[in-house]
């Protein structure tokens, strides 16, 4: 859509980028206008992140034109891109924890006076002004360490405004935000748009795309597919363009026979984190743990599995009580946890595929206490095949695989351990639509085989589509336990945003 | 969301309170305590002419090394070769006077500093461009430089009698009772401290140490800064080599042996985090003074001086445990403020 | 994805175990580079240095590097987890003092040995607890204990040295195997080497060590007892240092507070030369042994041609720097090859 036919602030045409033999981006087009919030959607591997990095000056494009305000530009460094007015807010903000908020905003371009002396008063005043303007109460003198991700993002935005950025690119900014924080971010984005800046919003969450943006561009396999005004399109249309085919059943739910409780958690408490957590998951059941970010769900999962300690309560797996803070014991009893952060917790990202796949089952592969690489490879072969992991060889470094394949390796690792209870935290985060439905199908299959599954998810459609029961957490407590028939967006969201007294 | 209100510029009261709580003040107080305790036992420690002079003078050599080391550590590196650089420079100075007895003293200072800086540049280039861990590189240069030193020295030894009097006087001269060398160290301290706190370059050292990846993303000239840090450390060690020769006159192949651990210890005690990103050169200098003053205080207090090293060890361990406890408490407080929102 | 309930996995898809053929993997490893260098130096020395390739030289060489060998065995796993132990030299001094004091008090040597080992274990545990329980960086802690243990060592013995030890023991320590010139203590070393190799390269515990070095978080999520493992490794480091300390006292007939000053740097140099990365997560014991041998052979060969120890220092230093840079260049080249696959693999 054209904003009064004016010259676009930023325009990429026919841009491509390859790394050796691999084509990351081919024939990408993108036009950003002032006063608009432009969404870019696409599966993993569609090339969005490469596009952003070219705009930010981290990569150089191989072909195509890159113009700002109608004039060609070519950034060789991030500093050049910043000087031209392009600011990127990454999914994980990168601030300097030891330095103050003010220093973070101005690092590298502090106002200086005589002898190169930094004008601290001026910096501070400006940052205080920015905080006021963004409507947040953050002390400019406090260290950046300990700020919530939402606050860190606000500081990144403050940086961008201070740079007088004309183009703000936000890469999956809401992935780690709670509802209130998302609203605050949107308000800020809208006010920036009204000031005449151009915003680009990359997200997997279609509800947010449709709530915030006015234009949407779809990319697939490194190429530009189409651009449309939000008003002129719909979610199924977008999905079809992204995936190249109709995806009807995103969440194939297979009914499974429900048996006895395999996981029983009673009165689990960790002061300051969660309190009085009690629930059970039965064989064949998929129980979803829903709630806003920060409600404490991942913390509960980690405590149940044993990575984190807890102070009160108990965890019993099929009649066997599990000692707290002891993942090895939990694993031995048949518990598995696929964590939230794939790259830092789920996988040893610098180790090979074979090593990762066998990480949970080594004790079983030993003879006389000894283990060989041969034995590991044999086992890894079996599981990599079963999950159809795409990799050249078993000793490829896990970090070189795509997000979806990395998740498959993590799943392979845990399935190889033959668990009876599987806790899976954000099973499809950062995964393209195609692999998503594979993961869901696999979960249903596992339930059918008799596993008890606890699924933590922030995506309501996933929760409502997959779960037999929905547990909802709010600020460290369980506020609702809804059977499938009673779980609706309204009931779940209500329980996620109110205390247990209010829900009851 | 944090609820700490956005205040206007912090008032004098708040600033003074911050100062009182700072690590540097704590070290200074500890130093004062040690001096007081020792002087009570033997007033000559502080009040005799020699005592006062040595108290200020002897630690100043290590203090200069500690200044350079602090800059390196703040940027999340470490320089183990400083002791060898001190030794090599000291021998160079001695040799210069032997070969050119008329050489002007200021020139010798400059040569010493530049020489040290060049050696530091070797370290810096290898670390900055080679992307190799500083600890290993400077371990290698520790060996290499010391080896060169020993090879060059042979079995010779340069004595005080070989040095011009003017130079040696500098080593013990005092200006208004304060040793000239100490004044020099203080001047260097003031300049470097000002640079670290008030210029873009100085703040970049902290940024690089706090999060090297973020520094790259911000487009900070990381390579250049790291190189600079090592050059600074080398130059400081070079200067310390000159000071050493001026103070003691006798130079053999073992000069500077162990200085690296003293300098690192001083910095750590002074509040410079070993992982980088925080701490001040002022703290490092106070740490050096505390460390060396304790060394000279122990015999006076009746503790046999071979227990010295044990005391140093306890000090270092105590300092880092304290740092950790304080950091944890602050982190907790920051998190609690946040969730109170 | 094939359904998981189906019996056999997709038989058409098969993965290569390794991306490169075995000969490439073995030949082009860091360990092989060091071993090759060692072989070259040994051959060159045998040919060019008179009296090098004799049993006498061999035995003195091995006697000299025995402490290094012992400690390097334990230092390697510590560094592979990403930690470091700078206090080993001081522990050698401390434990040799303990042996000396026991001997001077007319306690039997076996008691002295046990006591020294206990001291080593306790010192190592202190390091380990400060690192794992209190959460302090290993570099800082072991700089502190380097000073502390050395200080206690010197403090206990003062300026004296113990030089009288039970003849039976000192003869044993200095004994060689027949006419080969190989010291008897090497047998002990070989046994320990085998144990460490098995532990590090062939047990789940050892896999855990590597995992910790690559990613502490992921390791704990896979059931590795991260803190327990690190503590155990520090204790082992203390024990091996104690062993070296006992050897020092008995072999050199001298227990002094300043025994083995600077040894920690030699050990680290040898371990890094042998291919262990300072960042953690990679390394192998055969490379480490080659690293120690290389330093020993160089020192001994140069000593025989009257090259002074300072030149040896220079050479050690340069070698260390070169080996680390070479390693860095190699991994940079590898990452450029691999990058193409990595680029589009990130999310979005």
Image: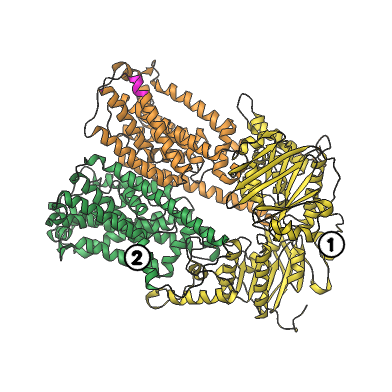
Give the structural element (helix, strand or loop) at label 2.
Answer: helix
**Which residue: 48% across, 65% down?**
A142
Q: From the viewer's perspective, is residue B267 above or below residue C57?
A: below
Report whether B17 appears left or right of A206: left
Can the viewer see residue A77? no
The colour chain C appears in is orange
Residue C124 in which image quadrant: top left
Tell me the tag on residue B193. Answer: 2
User: Over which residues does the magenta segment extend?
Assistant: C105-113
User: Which one is nearer the viewer's eye here, B146 or B2?
Assistant: B2
* Marker count (numbered): 2
Q: Which chain is green?
A: B
Report whether A122 appears left or right of C151: right
State the image coordinates of residue C330 (x, y, percent, origin top left): 54, 47
User: Which one is nearer the viewer's eye here, A14 or C311?
Assistant: A14
Membership of C108 in magenta stretch: yes
| Callout 1: chain | A
**Which residue: 53% across, 58% down?**
B336
Q: From the viewer's perspective, is residue B240 above or below residue C197?
A: below
Q: Which chain is yellow?
A: A
State the image coordinates of residue A28 (x, y, percent, origin top left): 73, 67
Give the structural element (helix, strand or loop) at label 1.
Answer: helix
Which quadrant of the figure contains the N terminus of chain A? bottom right
Report whether A242 appears left or right of A123: right
The residue tagged 1 is A240
Say whether marks 1 and 2 touch (CB < 8 Å).
no
| Callout 2: chain | B
For label 1, count other residues whose C-alpha is less than 10 Å away and answer few (under 14), some (14-19) or many (20+).
Answer: some
State the image coordinates of residue A39 (x, y, percent, origin top left): 73, 69
How far apart, in angstroms, are the residues tagged by discs 1 and 2?
A: 61 Å
State the image coordinates of residue B128 (x, y, percent, origin top left): 46, 57
């Amino acid at each position: 859509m054209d904003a009064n036919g004016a010259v676009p602030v930023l325009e990429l045409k026919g841009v491509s980028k390859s790394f050796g033999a691999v084509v990351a981006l081919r024939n990408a087009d993108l036009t950003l206008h002032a006063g608009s919030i432009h969404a870019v959607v696409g599966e993993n591997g569609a090339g969005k992140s490469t596009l952003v990095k070219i705009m930010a000056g981290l990569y150089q494009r191989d072909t195509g034109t890159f113009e700002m305000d109608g004039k060609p530009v070519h950034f060789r460094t991030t500093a050049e891109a910043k000087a031209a007015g392009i600011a990127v807010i990454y999914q994980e903000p990168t601030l300097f924890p030891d330095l103050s908020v003010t220093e973070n905003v101005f690092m590298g371009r502090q106002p200086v006076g005589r002898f190169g002396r930094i004008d601290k008063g001026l910096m501070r005043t400006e940052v205080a002004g920015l905080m006021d303007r963004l409507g947040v109460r953050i002390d400019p003198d406090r260290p950046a360490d300990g700020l919530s991700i939402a606050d860190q993002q606000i500081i990144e935005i403050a940086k961008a405004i201070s740079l007088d950025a004309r183009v703000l690119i936000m890469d999956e900014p809401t992935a780690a935000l709670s509802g209130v924080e998302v609203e605050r971010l949107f308000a800020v984005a809208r006010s920036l748009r009204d000031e005449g800046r151009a915003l680009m919003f990359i997200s997997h969450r279609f509800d947010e795309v449709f709530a915030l943006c006015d234009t949407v561009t779809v990319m697939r396999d490194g190429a530009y597919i189409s651009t449309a005004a939000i008003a002129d399109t719909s979610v199924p249309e977008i999905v079809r363009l992204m995936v190249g085919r109709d995806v009807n059943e995103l969440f194939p739910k297979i009914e499974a026979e429900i048996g006895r409780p395999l996981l029983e958690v009673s009165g689990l408490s960790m002061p300051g984190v969660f309190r009085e957590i009690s629930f059970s998951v039965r064989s064949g059941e998929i129980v979803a743990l829903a709630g806003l970010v920060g409600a404490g769900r991942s913390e509960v999962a980690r405590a149940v599995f044993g990575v984190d300690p807890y102070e009160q309560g108990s965890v019993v797996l099929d009649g066997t009580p599990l000692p707290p803070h002891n993942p090895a014991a939990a694993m031995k009893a048949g518990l598995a946890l696929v964590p939230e952060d794939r790259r830092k917790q789920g996988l040893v990202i610098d180790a090979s595929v074979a090593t990762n796949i066998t990480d949970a089952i080594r004790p079983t592969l030993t003879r006389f206490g000894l283990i060989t690489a041969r034995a590991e490879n044999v086992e890894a072969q079996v599981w990599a095949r079963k999950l159809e992991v795409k990799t050249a060889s078993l000793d490829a470094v896990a970090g070189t695989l795509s997000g979806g394949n990395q998740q498959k390796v993590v799943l392979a690792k845990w399935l190889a351990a033959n668990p009876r209870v599987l806790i899976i935290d954000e099973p499809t985060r950062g995964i393209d639509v195609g692999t998503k439905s594979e993961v869901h199908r696999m979960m249903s299959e596992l339930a059918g085989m008799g596993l008890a599954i606890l699924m933590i998810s922030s995506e309501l459609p996933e929760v409502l589509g997959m779960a037999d029961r929905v547990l909802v957490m709010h600020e460290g407590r369980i506020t609702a336990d809804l059977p499938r028939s009673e779980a609706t967006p309204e009931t779940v969201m209500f329980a996620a945003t109110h205390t247990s007294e209010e829900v009851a | 969301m944090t609820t700490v209100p956005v205040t206007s510029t912090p008032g004098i009261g708040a600033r003074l309170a911050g100062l009182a709580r700072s690590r540097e003040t704590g070290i200074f107080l500890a130093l004062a305590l040690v001096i007081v305790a020792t002087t009570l036992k033997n007033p000559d420690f502080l009040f005799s002419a020699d005592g006062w002079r040595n108290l200020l003078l002897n630690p100043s050599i290590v203090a200069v090394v500690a200044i350079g080391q602090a800059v390196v550590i703040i940027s999340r590196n470490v320089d183990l070769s400083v002791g060898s650089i001190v030794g090599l420079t000291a021998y160079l100075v001695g040799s210069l006077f032997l070969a050119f007895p008329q050489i002007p003293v200021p020139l010798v200072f400059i040569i010493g500093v530049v020489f040290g800086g060049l050696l530091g540049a070797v370290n810096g280039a290898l670390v900055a461009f080679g992307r190799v861990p500083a600890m290993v590189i400077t371990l290698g240069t520790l060996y290499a430089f010391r080896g060169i030193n020993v090879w060059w020295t042979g079995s010779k030894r340069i004595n005080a009698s070989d040095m011009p009097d003017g130079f040696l006087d500098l080593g013990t001269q005092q200006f208004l009772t304060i040793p000239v060398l100490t004044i020099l160290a203080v001047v260097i301290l003031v300049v470097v401290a000002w640079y670290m706190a008030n210029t873009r370059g100085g703040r970049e050292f902290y940024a690089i140490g706090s999060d090297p990846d973020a520094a790259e993303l911000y487009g900070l000239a990381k390579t250049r800064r790291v190189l600079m840090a090592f050059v600074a450390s080398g130059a400081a060690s070079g200067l310390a080599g000159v000071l050493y020769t001026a103070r003691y006159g006798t130079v053999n192949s073992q000069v500077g042996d162990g200085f690296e651990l003293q300098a690192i210890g001083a910095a750590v005690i002074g509040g410079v985090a070993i992982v980088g990103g925080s701490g001040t050169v002022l703290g490092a200098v106070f740490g050096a003074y505390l460390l060396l003053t304790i060394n000279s205080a122990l015999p006076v207090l009746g503790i046999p001086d071979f227990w010295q090293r044990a005391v140093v060890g306890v000090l270092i361990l105590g300092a880092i445990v304290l740092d950790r406890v304080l950091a944890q408490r602050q982190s907790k407080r920051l998190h609690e403020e946040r969730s109170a929102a | 994805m094939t359904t998981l309930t189906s019996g056999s996995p997709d038989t058409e898809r098969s993965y290569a175990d390794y991306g490169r053929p075995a000969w490439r993997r073995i030949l082009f490893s860091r360990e092989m580079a060091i071993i090759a260098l060692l072989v070259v130096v040994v051959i060159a020395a045998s040919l060019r240095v008179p009296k090098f390739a004799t049993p006498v030289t061999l035995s003195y060489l091995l006697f000299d590097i025995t402490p290094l060998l012992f400690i390097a065995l334990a230092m390697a796993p510590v560094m592979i987890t990403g930690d470091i132990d700078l206090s080993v030299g001081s522990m050698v001094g401390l434990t040799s003092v303990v042996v000396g004091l026991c001997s001077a008090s007319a306690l039997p040597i076996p008691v002295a040995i046990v006591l020294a080992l206990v001291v080593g274990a306790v010192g190592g545990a202190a390091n380990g607890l400060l690192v794992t329980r209190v959460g302090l960086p290993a570099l800082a802690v072991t700089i502190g204990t380097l000073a502390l243990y050395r200080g206690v060592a010197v403090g206990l013995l003062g300026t004296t040295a113990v030089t009288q030890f039970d003849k039976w023991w000192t003869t044993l320590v200095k004994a060689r195997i027949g006419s080969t010139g190989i010291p008897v203590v090497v047998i002990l070393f070989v046994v320990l080497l085998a144990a460490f190799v098995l532990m590090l390269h062939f047990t789940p515990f050892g896999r855990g060590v590597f995992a910790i070095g690559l990613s502490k978080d992921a390791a704990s999520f896979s059931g590795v007892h991260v803190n327990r493992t690190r503590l155990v490794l520090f204790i082992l480091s203390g024990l091996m240092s104690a062993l070296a300390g006992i050897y020092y006292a008995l072999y050199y007939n001298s227990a002094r507070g300043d025994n083995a000053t600077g040894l920690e740097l030699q050990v680290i140099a040898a371990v890094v030369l042998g291919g262990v990365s300072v960042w953690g997560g990679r390394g192998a014991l055969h490379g480490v042994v080659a690293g120690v041998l290389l330093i020993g052979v160089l020192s001994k060969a140069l000593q025989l041609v009257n090259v002074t120890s300072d030149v040896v220092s220079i050479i050690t230093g340069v070698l260390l720097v070169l080996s680390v840079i070479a390693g860095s260049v190699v991994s940079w080249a590898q990452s450029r090859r691999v990058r193409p696959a990595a680029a589009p693999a990130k999310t979005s």
